Amino acid sequence: MENSYYLLRHGRNIHQTELKDICYGWPDDDIPCRLDEVGIKQAILAGEKLKDFNIDLIFSSPILRTKQTAEIVANILGITTICFDKRLRDMNWGVFAGGPKQRVYEYYSKRDLMYDAPEKGESWSELQKRVVSVIKDIEGEYKNKNILIVSHGDPILLLKAFYNKWGLDEILKEKKNIKVGEFHELRRKNT
């Protein structure tokens, strides 16, 4: 890769505060999901930590919780422009959007998480292709930049999986490590 990437998951949101175990809508305007006070503090803390990485550019999902996180971090870093890209949105859960996550768990208990998509939704494989296309476009346009990507748990997980060549077992193991308000450096394994 020509650039260095830092992947930041949005801060905690009101649905996480209220322990609503739901699949978010797509776009999430159906279920407005702003940062709560803890999420705002997480974004501020991430911004302070990211000062050490000389971030040049910020790309973000346009969904409210990521947009708020990106704007807080950009303000701390003195970055005036954020590129909002729909391809960085969260997973499209299709018919499961707005419903309990339990329905998704039941659906995938008999299906392939990587390749089976719910009706009107997308699979992890499709999500991965979507978010990887963002990095490929950035790579074609910028060189030697420190780039912050603000997104959601699954997109960040699947970006890391693609560039580290993880199989499904490794992806599932790493999923718990993609916490709200935390960032990860995107590293490509030596081939």
Image (cartoon, grey):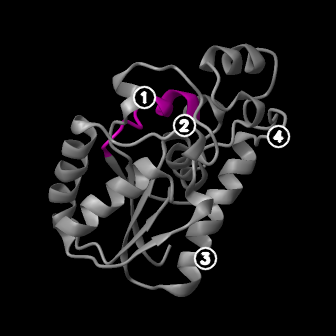
**Residue 172 among magenta residues:** yes
Q: CA distance from mark 2 to mark 1?
A: 9 Å
Q: Which residue is mark 1?
A: 15
Say what secondary structure mark 2 lies in: loop
Q: Which residue is mark 2?
A: 31
Which is nearer the N-term, disc 3 or disc 2? 2
**Magenta region: which residues?**
171-182
Under mark 3, the amino acid is: Asp
Say what secondary structure mark 4 lies in: loop
| Image mark for residue 120 | 4
Of residues 42 and 174, the one nearer the viewer is 42
Q: Which residue is mark 3?
A: 137
Given this view, does label 2 or label 4 mark the residue nearer the observer?
2
Which is nearer the N-term, disc 3 or disc 4? 4
Instruction: Residue at 71%, 28% (x, y): give it.
Output: 96
Under mark 1, the amino acid is: His
Which is nearer the N-term, disc 2 or disc 4? 2
Q: CA distance from mark 4 to mark 1?
A: 23 Å
Q: Is residue 165 left or right of residue 21?
A: right
